[in-house]
Amino acid sequence: MLRRIRRMTLVVASGLAIIAVVAFAADYAIFRLRVAKGWTPYGSVTVLHYDAVPQRNGKTELSSIRRRSKRASVRLFRTPAIRLAGI
C-alpha cells in the first residue's frame, strides 16, 4: 500500500513538473515569435506610488505620489534574461 502511494505521488509530481516545463517553453516560444514577427509582445501597466504618512493619533494616511505607465511583456512567466535586458 505504501509503495502504491509513493508511486502515485511520484507520477503526479512528475506530471506537474512536465506540464510546468511545457507551459514555460510554449510561453517563451510565443514571446520570441511575437518579437521576431514584429507583433506587439508588450503591453502597459499603470504603477501607482504611495506614501504612508503616520499621523499623531496613531493612524496612517496613504497619499498618492505619482502614477506612471510602464512597459511590460505579455507573458505568463518572466525570465531573468528578459528582465536584465529591460524587456
Image (cartoon, rainbow, N blue to C red):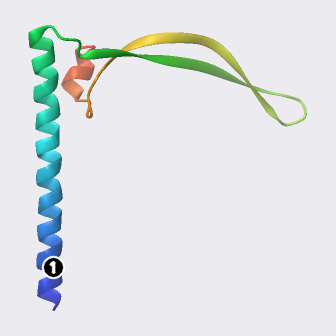
Assign the N terminus to one quadrant of the image. bottom left
Residue at horizontal 17%, vertical 63%? 13
Q: Residues within 10 Å of mark 1 (few under 14, many from 20)?
A: few
Q: Residue furthest bottom?
A: 1
Image position of 52 (left or right of 23): right
Establish if 77 lies above or below 48: below
Q: Secondary structure at mark 1?
A: helix
Measuring from the top left, give residue 19's x and y in whole percent. 14, 51
Assign the C terminus to one quadrant of the image. top left
Mark 1: which amino acid? Answer: Arg
Measuring from the top left, give residue 26's x and y in whole percent. 12, 35
Measuring from the top left, give residue 14's x and y in whole percent. 12, 61
Residue at horizontal 10%, vertical 10%? 37
Q: Quadrant of residue 60?
A: top right
Image position of 6 (left or right of 86): left
Q: Residue furthest top?
A: 38
Reading the image, the residue beneath label 1 is: 6
Establish if 21 lies above or below 84: below
Residue at horizontal 90%, vertical 34%? 57
